[in-house]
Image: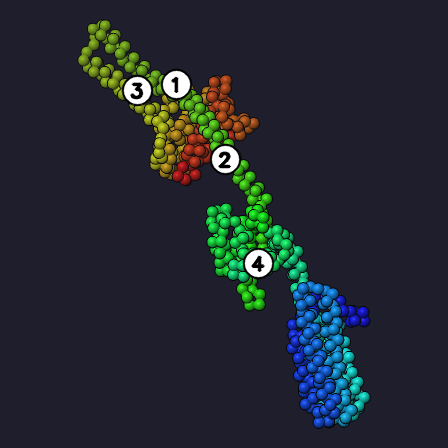
């Protein structure tokens, strides 16, 4: 405890706080107090003695002023040895001043000065000396010594001279002394915390890994040590004297003039209170580097400043550049692969078209077989009757009309197929009923030949805006696949059901379904479940491309109770 009280190893920040009002307190204790004491005691004390006493006080005042100047200069330069020496002298002069004032009070009491005047003298000395001592709150151990040595010495003097009035003064002064000690301790604790916080902030400020600067208008007002290292400067003074334009390349990466863009950034930070951006700075040797910059508006002593922090992100920017170059290369490779896949799809489409042409010829043969047989029968009847001489005009007309009717049916069939396989270049408004009707007219003859029932179920019919013929081709492919399965498996009572439900078109059969092991692969190119019958494996793949890529819909398959069930869903969109 006593070692701490007599310790003179003070924090620079605490001493700096003590110096803030040091000149005022010196003037109060060494000029104002002696002058008042002189005025109140010159008629009872020896004037010569008082003149010597006040001269000493004035000399001490000049000494305190000189020491305060030296101490302030040493604190500013962080010269710790000089700070310690001058601070000891500073404390000593304060003690001498207080003791000289106390001497006059005690001398006055020895001359039996009336109690009221002694009380007034005490108030003057205590008040102004306490004001003088308040400059020591930054170093409470010295403050404590000052109060104990001066106040309690005065209390002892009052008790020594005795008397009811002096005893009362002694009691009052004791209470007052204890109060100012408690108040002084509380103020010292507050100052110590402030000093500690300020020192901590200063330490963080100077040792931060980030560069920190304070900007006033467009100039650097202060910076930390990291900033010096970042720009390759040796001293803060040298850096702060350098114009800000020397820290920047002429142009930023986006081609904007650096000075013009920086003014814009500063203006935004002042306006919003906060602004972050990436920036290019230039080191002292001319090396350009990238930083991540944050500007924050702050106020110090009612002065508006910008607090800036930045860190070097050059390596990150280089990685980003490499990433962008890699991305560009990757995009180029992707484009090349997409082009290859596009050519591949074209080849697959051509293959699929050839397969569809083969199926089309087969379906045309089915459609033409009955009309051609009827025409052959009609011409045969004409030939037989003509050879027997039994032909008449009415029979010729009747058979000719039938031949014409069958010929028109053949022509209509050709037109149906021509329209069916014509590519759509634009979307049209249609519905699933219209699409199924067109497909049924083409494939119905083939299904009848194989004794397959074709059923249509309409739950709810919605309008569509899509590529009509492409959806027809997909539906035709699904029905044809179902027909092949039913024929291949020789299913009894073979049935294909087409169900329309809003935006969904569902094609189901009773052929037993698809093996679960290959269900997920059924839409892959060149994957076929009927390779033994020369299947290309492209029909379902091309159907998926048409529905999902071109028409922006969805096609899926599940195994239902009786067989496979394919669903085309255009989702109520502009498919």
286 vs 169: above or below: above
To which residue does mark 3 refer? Answer: 410
The residue shown at (75%, 90%) is 108
**Are there few (<14), some (14-19), or many (20+) residues within 10 Å of tag 2?**
few
Q: Which mark is residue 331?
A: 2
For the residues labelled 4 and 1, the Cα–Cα distance comes to 94 Å
For the residues labelled 3 and 2, the Cα–Cα distance comes to 53 Å
Picture coordinates of residue 273 (x, y %)?
A: 52, 60
Question: Who comes first in sequence, dot 3 or dot 4?
Answer: 4
Picture coordinates of residue 195 (x, y %)?
A: 67, 66
At mark 2, the secondary structure is helix
To which residue does mark 4 refer? Answer: 241
Marks 1/3 in contact by CB < 8 Å: the verdict is no
Marks 2/4 in contact by CB < 8 Å: the verdict is no
Picture coordinates of residue 235 (x, y %)?
A: 63, 56
The residue shown at (73%, 85%) is 53
At mark 3, the secondary structure is helix
Locate residue 476 relative to residue 306 in the image: left or right.
left
Q: Which mark is residue 362?
A: 1
Quadrant in which the N terminus appears: bottom right
- Quarter of the image for residue 369 reads top left
549 vs 448: above or below: below
Question: Who comes first in sequence, dot 4 or dot 1?
Answer: 4
**Are there few (<14), some (14-19), or many (20+) residues within 10 Å of tag 1?**
few
């Amino acid at each position: 405890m006593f070692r701490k009280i007599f310790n003179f190893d003070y924090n620079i920040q605490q001493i700096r706080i003590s110096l803030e009002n040091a000149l005022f307190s010196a003037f109060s204790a060494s000029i104002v107090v002696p002058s008042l004491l002189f005025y109140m005691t010159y008629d009872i004390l020896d004037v010569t003695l008082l003149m010597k006493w006040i001269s000493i006080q004035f000399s001490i005042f000049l000494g305190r002023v000189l020491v305060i100047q030296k101490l302030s200069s040493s604190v500013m330069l962080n010269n710790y040895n000089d700070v310690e020496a001058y601070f000891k002298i500073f404390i000593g002069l304060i003690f001498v001043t207080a003791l000289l004032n106390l001497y006059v009070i005690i001398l006055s009491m020895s001359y039996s000065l009336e109690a009221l005047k002694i009380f007034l003298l005490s108030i003057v000395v205590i008040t102004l000396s306490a004001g003088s001592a308040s400059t020591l709150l930054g170093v409470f151990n010295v403050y404590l010594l000052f109060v104990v040595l001066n106040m309690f010495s005065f209390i002892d003097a009052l008790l020594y001279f005795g008397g009811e009035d002096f005893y009362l003064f002694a009691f009052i002064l004791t209470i007052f002394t204890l109060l100012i000690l408690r108040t002084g301790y509380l103020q010292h604790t507050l100052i110590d915390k402030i000093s500690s916080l300020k020192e901590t902030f200063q330490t963080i400020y100077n040792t931060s890994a980030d560069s920190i600067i304070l900007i006033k208008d467009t100039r650097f007002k202060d910076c930390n040590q990291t900033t010096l290292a970042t720009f390759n400067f040796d001293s803060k003074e040298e850096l702060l004297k350098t114009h800000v334009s020397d820290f920047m390349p002429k142009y930023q990466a986006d081609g904007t003039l650096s000075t013009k863009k920086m003014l814009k950034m500063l203006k935004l930070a002042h306006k919003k209170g906060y602004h972050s951006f990436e920036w290019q700075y230039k080191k002292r040797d001319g090396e350009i580097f990238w930083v991540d910059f944050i500007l924050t508006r702050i106020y110090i002593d009612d002065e508006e400043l910008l607090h800036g922090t930045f860190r070097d992100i050059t390596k990150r920017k280089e990685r980003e550049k490499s990433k962008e170059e890699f991305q560009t290369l990757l995009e180029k490779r992707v484009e090349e692969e997409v082009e290859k896949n596009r050519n591949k799809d074209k080849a697959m489409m051509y293959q699929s078209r050839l397969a569809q042409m083969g199926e089309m010829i087969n379906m045309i043969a089915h459609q033409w077989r009955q009309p051609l047989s009827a025409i052959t029968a009609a011409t045969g009847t004409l030939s037989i009757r003509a050879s027997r001489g039994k032909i008449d005009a009415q029979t010729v007309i009747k058979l000719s009309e039938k031949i014409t009717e069958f010929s028109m049916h053949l022509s209509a069939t050709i037109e149906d197929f021509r329209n069916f396989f014509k590519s759509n270049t634009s979307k049209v408004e249609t519905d699933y009923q219209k699409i199924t009707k067109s497909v049924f007219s083409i494939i119905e003859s083939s299904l009848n030949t194989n004794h397959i029932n074709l059923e249509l179920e309409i739950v709810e019919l919605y309008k569509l805006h899509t590529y009509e013929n492409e959806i027809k081709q997909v539906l035709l492919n699904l029905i044809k696949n179902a027909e092949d399965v039913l024929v291949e498996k020789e299913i009894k009572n073979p049935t294909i059901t087409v169900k329309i439900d809003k935006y969904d078109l569902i094609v189901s059969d009773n052929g037993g379904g698809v093996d679960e092991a290959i269900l997920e692969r059924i839409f892959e190119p060149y994957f076929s479940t009927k390779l033994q019958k020369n299947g290309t494996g492209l029909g379902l793949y091309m159907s998926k491309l048409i529905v999902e890529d071109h028409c922006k819909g969805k096609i899926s398959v599940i195994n239902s109770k009786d067989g496979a069930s394919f669903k085309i869903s255009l989702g109520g969109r502009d498919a």
